Amino acid sequence: MTTFGISAECGRLIEYDTVDELRSLCADGMLRDALPLGGGSNMLFTRPQCDITVIHCRNADYSISPDNTEDAALLTAAAGCVLDNLCRITSEQGFWGLENLSGIPGEIGGAAVQNVGAYGTEFSDVVKSVRCLDTRSNTIVSFTADECRYGYRDSRFKHLPSPADLIVVEAELMLSTMPKPNLRYAALAEAFGHLKPEELTPSMLREEVLRLRNGKLPDPSSTGSAGSFFKNPVVSAEFHREMQQRLGIEIPGHPASDSEIKLSAAWLIDKAGCKSFTCGGASLWPSQPLVIVNTCGKATGTDVIGLENKIISRVHDVFGVMLTPEVIHI
Ligand code: EPU
């Protein structure tokens, strides 16, 4: 149930279909200290046995309805919807919003927690609200996008005393029927920048995003990984300047705020000379060293952590920057 393809056993697995079912599990005390799992694309089970209850939503219902404005549509999707299925369906039907997220593994529940993102778009750019079961009161609560406190791969759901305090059951996403191509990502601007928005379709962007991903990222059906293993570190502009002076090289980065720069973790890992690092069955994907892969399908959680620590330590020695994992360790 995780994309890393690392064997691990949990104490108990509960799969539910309806919110009523989830509420009665909650009433029976079955969700206490449970771990909600989506598509398992951002999780590393570090031990072969862990005595926890894993809870997974099997409901993949969705509906698309017109919003009260003419040029928007509301997509309501249950937590168990596979994000890329929604990207494909909405793109094919001509709705704008999810096309740049094409190919991201995982389900709506995980996307809402993690604020997944790629190719210039984040989940938070399209989300309108997120509905959750608050297991502390066994009531359904709804959060607006603002209340979800989205940040870079971050949300309020990642800062709960226990991850099962709020279990995402559904998200509402706002899509556009008017052309709204997002070409912020340089490779997309290069491919489509010469065209007018009305000459583009969401499917054209989706196809290009999938092509870019296929060229850089491992195919999840054959090579286990959890996508980007580390976050792109954000440092102060002053630290960035000082770092460039100290090392006498230009260090690529993008403004993250007025006074902060987001560095490329892939670049740091590459330039620190980590690309060939391995640990047991874990190695780095050659064309995107931000991705730790389960080399021959035999990696263990300990191998991945070993490689992670080697990389963190080398990048810190060379650049003075501390990488932090994006992948959740269980
Ligand atoms: N690079 C190197 N050496 C290499 C490969 C790449 O130096 O061998 C450098 C290049 O400078 C290049 C940069 O790395 O410019 C890579 O940048 P890119 O925009 O391709 O990807 P990223 O910043 O490394 C982020 C997300 C990905 C997302 C891509 C595309 C994070 C942690 N990762 O990666 O998300 O697909 O942008 O938008 O923000 C994920 O979260 O699982 C994920 C795959």
Image: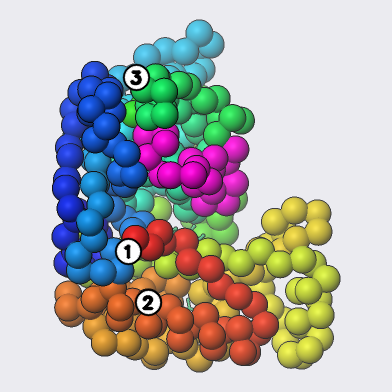
Q: Residue at x 57, y 59 (%)?
A: 186
Indicate the amino acid at tag 3.
Ile
Q: Are marks 1 and 2 in contact (CB under 8 Å)?
A: yes
Mark 2 to mark 3 CA distance (whole Å): 42 Å
Q: Residue at x 17, y 37 (%)?
A: 15
Q: Main secondary structure of the magenta part?
A: loop
Indicate the amino acid at tag 1.
Leu
- Return the disc, 2 or 3, that comes first in the chain's sequence: 3
Of 277 and 137, nearer the camera is 137
Q: Nearer the viewer, mark 2 or mark 3?
A: 2
Q: How many marks?
A: 3
Residue corresponding to mark 3? 64
Q: Is residue 242 left or right of residue 72?
A: right
Membership of 221 in magenta stretch: no
- Residue 44 disc label: 1
Which quadrant would the C terminus be assigned to in this image? bottom left
Membership of 150 in magenta stretch: yes
Q: Is residue 88 visible?
A: no
Corner quadrant of residue 75? top left
Highlighted magenta segment, given as a residue range: 149-168
Mark 1 to mark 2 CA distance (whole Å): 9 Å
Q: Secondary structure at mark 1?
A: strand
Task: Return the x and y of residue 49 as percentages of the image width and height.
Answer: 19, 65
Indicate the amino acid at tag 2.
Ile
Mark 3 to mark 1 CA distance (whole Å): 34 Å
Q: Nearer the viewer, mark 3 or mark 1?
A: 1
Residue corresponding to mark 2? 305
* Circle 3 Cα neighbour tier, 10 Å, few/some/many (<14 / 14–19 / ≥20): some
52 up-or-down from 63: above or below: below
Task: Return the x and y of residue 158 as percentages of the image width and height.
Answer: 49, 46
Of 77 and 210, nearer the camera is 77
- Return the disc, 1 or 2, that comes first in the chain's sequence: 1
